[in-house]
Image: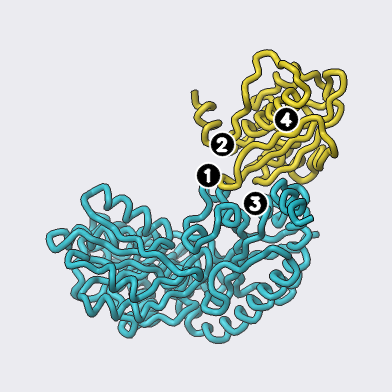
Amino acid sequence: MYSEKVMDHFMNPRNMGEIENADGVGTVGNAKCGDIMRIFLKVEDGVIQDVKFKTFGCGAAVATSSMATELVLGKTIQEALQVTNQAVMEALDGLPPVKVHCSLLAEQAIHAALWDYAQKHGIEIEGREPPVDDIEELEELAEV
Amino acid sequence: MNRLVYADHSATTAVRPEVLEAMLPFLKEQYGNPSSLYQIAQESKIALEKARAQLARAIGAKEREIFFTGSGTEADNWAIKGVAEAMRHRGRHIITSSVEHHAVLHTCEYLEKHGFSVTYLPVDAEGTVSPKDLEAAIRPDTILVSVMMANNEIGTINPVQELGTVCRRHQVLFHVDAVQALGTLPIDVEAQQIDLLSVSAHKLYGPKGVGALYVRKGVKLPPFIHGGAQESGRRAGTENVAGIVGFGRAVELAVAEMDERNAQLRAMRDRLIDTILEKVPFSRLNGARYNRLPGHASFSFSFIEGESMLLLLDMKGVCASSGSACTSGSLDPSHVLLAIGLPHETAHGSLRLTLGRENTMEDVEYIAQVLPPIVQKLREMSPLYEDYMKQQQ
């Protein structure tokens, strides 16, 4: 059902945990649907110096969170915003169709943490809109 | 870690050696079509009728009241759609419960789109259907009641005989999905006042692809699959002879060994339930503590999600199942867990372990050893657990 990469990131999640006094924290999803992702960011000079995640969800939810943290670590804010769910999926060698929403959630969790960072630090991020934290809404967006 | 513990017997079971042995001749030299005239074909016919007698005896029915099908699901479909069709001039109301298998629920939903109304009876916190609720729901236009004998997800056993009494008193046909119960719980269609009963072979160490419907003599039920004259003209299609022979042998063995097997299963189940509830904080048992299938345990673990648990258990060689959304193929967790009142997040964290004849107490100890660290690992990853622990401080 899952690729080897998905299983690897699920079994050995990278960057799992919390960052105390994080510069940005984003939580998306809801318990009702069975997926919640939380991303913690440490940002210095506009570069993501550290990133951690916590996830309540299925194997794909854990793996996409883990992969998303790897993809944004060391990136500038603008670069991190370019990391799409598609990129997360490709890096994991694909996801089953019913699990595509997990990658959307991972993308939105990163955005939510960046949004929080921008709000807290009074920074304008070009082209940023408030993050979407509802999976069903996300899936509707994905279908468009 | 090469140990394999199969603990998903409510999903399916392995064909037992005696059953396979009974089936093999009908896949090899005795391949004749039971409808044909010559000798090898007649042997198939005889074997088919022997299996029919074995199943009839197991449920207290007569041979001519047993009709083999391709699955338990087909039997459920046939019973419900068949009664609806035959009785639609008398009424268009059907009563079922909110915790039925999808084979019943989705069939009822289909009928709702075709002019029937359906009452979905609620269940109590253990998942039991109340005969009083049933009686209150019966209307003059009620034509059928369909309630399962034992629940596949939470293992709870319904008071079928009392429900049957209510149906008989109101002269409403009573269909029972006994797929989880056959071979495990005693069934007597006379005493339990059952008019239609669905069963399947692969839950009791028989082969997949064979089910049966018991139809009480006198119940009008039109054919569901049209074609040849097989099954007294009521279920066309060349019979799955080997499968049916296996079914007959499997049910015969299961009934003969029932008491002894159930005592072993109950001991293992109780040990599993007690140990897990004791070792894992924030855990609960779903369904009744004792009024449940002998090998059946269903838990919910707060703050974590079921599919992750299944993947990690699989790595340890433990085969189990869950009612989480990710395993149901939708965003909603199991309708059964929601019907017994679990909040969504608790229902997502459910785990079903169903033991069977090849399990041992060592398997139970093994599960009790590997499961708690898995739950702990996932909780350490969970933002819900983090929030909860911070609130407690």
The reply to whether callout 2 and callout 3 are in contact (CB within 8 Å) is no
* Residue B216 seen in the figure: yes
Same subunit: marks 1 and 4: no
Q: Nearer the viewer, mark 4 or mark 3?
A: 4
Applied colour scheme: by chain
Of all residues shown, which one is farthest toward the top? Answer: A126
Same subunit: marks 1 and 3: yes
Chain B, colour shown: cyan
Instruction: Quote the CA–CA distance across marks 4 and 3.
Output: 23 Å
Query: What residue is disc 2 on?
Result: A135
Q: Amino acid at mark 3?
A: Glu
Instruction: Quote the CA–CA distance across marks 2 and 3.
Output: 16 Å
Q: How far from the left and from the top, in percent, is residue A58?
A: 65, 46
Q: How far from the left and from the top, in percent, is residue A66?
A: 75, 36
Instruction: Quote the CA–CA distance across marks 1 and 4.
Output: 24 Å
Using residue B379 as the reference point, say whether residue B176 is left or right of it: left
**Residue shown at the point (39%, 57%) measured from the top left:** B103
The reply to whether callout 4 and callout 3 are in contact (CB within 8 Å) is no
Q: Amino acid at mark 2?
A: Ile
- Nearer-N-terminus badge (1/3): 3
The reply to whether callout 1 and callout 4 are in contact (CB within 8 Å) is no
Say few, some or many: other residues with alpha carbon within 10 Å of mark 1 (under 14 / 14 to 19 / 20 or more): some
Query: What residue is disc 3 on?
Result: B305
**Residue shown at the point (57%, 56%) measured from the top left:** B347
Q: Nearer the viewer, mark 2 or mark 4?
A: 4
**Residue shown at the point (28%, 67%) measured from the top left:** B137
The reply to whether callout 1 and callout 2 are in contact (CB within 8 Å) is yes
Which chain corresponds to the colour yellow?
A: A
Above or below residue B210? Residue B273 is: below
Q: Amino acid at mark 4?
A: Ala
Query: What residue is disc 4 on?
Result: A113
Q: Which mark is residue B331?
A: 1
